[in-house]
Image (cartoon, rainbow, N blue to C red):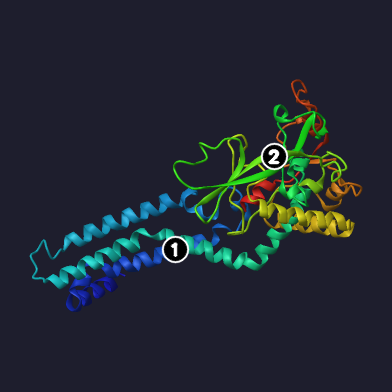
């Protein structure tokens, strides 16, 4: 090996002194080998699907210690390079040179430093290569479609199935539901479930031009606002109370009411709406409303068909996806189907935990808890599916 290195160095110093002086041949050779190793490391990092549950794939390099390993290698390589380069340096020994040769040396320096400090790209390329081959877009899109369809039956929280979640069909696609007790006019039509009140309003819309003199800080009482393409902003305000008793048989939580988007793939066509500070933008009905309406329409169609075999197949397909990605769950298709299939009004009668229980929650005190919360605890089962980990995947 030593003889081979000496032979290469002799050839370089006789025919390509600049390459010999900069040590670019050896540095690039070592860097390419290390880049290949990082690529292979990236290629095997996600072979266990559980590794996707803790972090996004794009952050693994920075969170699993690889970045420190990469930095150590880069520092060692650059230090050794500088030591050997200055050992026989043209400047140090006053070798004759020219402006072009100097420029060429600095270009080679840049190439050496670049290849010695960019192992992240090879690692990331290995990750992407594995993902593209292991999880093709066509299969992933079908899995997302299945997950969004089946998510109506996840029933983790009773609040996801209350009537204020309705954004479909008409007239609910254009109504606003007030749930805060102090803001409900009890003298006008409203719904009640275990002390929780729901009152629906028409909305009226006012559009203002964008500008410093008119902005959301000066406009009060709006429900939400939306920026338009023509440098204007449309604000929605509560108008008059609407009696929805003709459209709703009951205020009981139902699978019909579910409108959550379990997973959005890529850049979906969504509405970017912003709520008033009186409402939590992370859970209000207006964010991503177009997608929610599509999801809820699909839920309505599925429930109205009332086909037990279709629902059971959907649940089974979803569980197959969870097994593929090693998502923790103690559900099976038959048990899950019996819990959710209530064909009369598809009322939610059983809830499923969104994580594996760490302790017995049955002892929780009922003091200072609303009837709604007590009922939710009552119908919560010990069955679970770690759907949050599936969302991360």
Observer-side mark, 1 or 2, equals 2
The residue where tag 2 is placed is 239
Quadrant location of the N terminus in the rendered image: bottom left
Query: Disc 1 marks which residue?
Result: 122
Check the image and report above or below for 284 versus 22.
above
Q: Is residue 167 left or right of residue 36?
A: right
Q: Residue at x 48, y 48 (%)?
A: 210
Distance in Å between CA atoms under marks 1 and 2: 58 Å
Q: Are marks 1 and 2 in contact (CB under 8 Å)?
A: no
Residue at 18 percent of width and 69 percent of height: 103
| Relative side of 139 to 334, left or right | left
Of mark 1 and mark 2, the one earlier in the sequence is: 1
Is residue 12 positioned above or below 121 on the image?
Answer: below
| Picture residue at 58% right of the left edge, 63% below the top | 131
Residue 330 makes an appearance in the image: no
Q: Secondary structure at mark 1?
A: helix
Residue 254 falls left or right of residue 139: right
Q: Is residue 332 visible?
A: yes
Which image quadrant is residue 221 in? top right
- Residue 254 lies, in percent from the top left, at 82, 44
In percent of width and height, residue 179 lies at: 72, 34
């Amino acid at each position: 090996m030593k003889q081979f290195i000496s032979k290469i160095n002799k050839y370089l110093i006789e025919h390509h002194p600049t390459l010999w002086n900069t040590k670019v041949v050896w540095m690039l050779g070592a860097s390419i080998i290390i880049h290949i190793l990082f690529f292979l490391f990236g290629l095997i990092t996600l072979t266990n699907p559980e590794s996707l549950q803790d972090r996004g794939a794009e952050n693994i390099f920075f969170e699993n210690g690889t970045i420190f390993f990469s930095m150590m290698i880069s520092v060692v390589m650059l230090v050794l390079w500088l030591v050997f380069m200055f050992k026989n340096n043209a400047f140090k020994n006053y070798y004759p040179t020219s402006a072009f040769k100097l420029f060429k040396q600095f270009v080679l320096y840049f190439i050496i430093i670049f290849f010695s400090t960019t192992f992240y790209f090879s690692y990331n390329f290995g990750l992407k290569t594995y993902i593209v081959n292991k999880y093709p877009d066509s299969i992933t899109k079908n899995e997302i479609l299945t997950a969004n369809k089946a998510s109506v039956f996840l029933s983790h929280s009773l609040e996801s199935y209350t009537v204020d979640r309705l954004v479909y069909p008409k007239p609910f696609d254009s109504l606003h539901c007030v749930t805060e007790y102090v803001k409900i006019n009890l003298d006008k039509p409203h719904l009640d479930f275990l002390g929780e009140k729901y009152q629906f309003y028409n909305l009226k819309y006012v559009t203002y031009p964008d500008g410093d003199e008119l902005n959301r800080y000066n406009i009060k009482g709006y429900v939400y606002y939306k920026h338009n393409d023509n440098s204007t902003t449309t604000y929605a305000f509560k108008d008059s109370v609407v009696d929805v008793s003709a459209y709703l048989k009951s205020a009981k939580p139902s699978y019909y009411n579910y409108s959550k988007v379990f997973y959005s793939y890529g850049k979906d066509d969504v509405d970017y709406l912003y709520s008033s500070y009186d409402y939590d933008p992370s859970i209000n009905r207006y964010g991503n409303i177009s997608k929610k309406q599509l999801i809820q329409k699909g839920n309505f169609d599925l429930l109205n068909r009332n086909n037990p075999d279709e629902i059971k197949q959907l649940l089974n397909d979803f569980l197959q996806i969870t097994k593929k990605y090693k998502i923790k769950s103690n559900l099976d298709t038959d048990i899950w189907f019996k819990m959710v299939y209530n064909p009369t009004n598809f009322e939610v009668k059983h809830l499923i935990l969104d994580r594996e229980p760490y302790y017995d929650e049955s002892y929780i005190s009922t003091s200072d808890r609303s009837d709604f919360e007590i009922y939710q605890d009552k119908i919560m089962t010990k069955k679970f599916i770690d759907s949050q980990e599936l969302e991360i995947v």
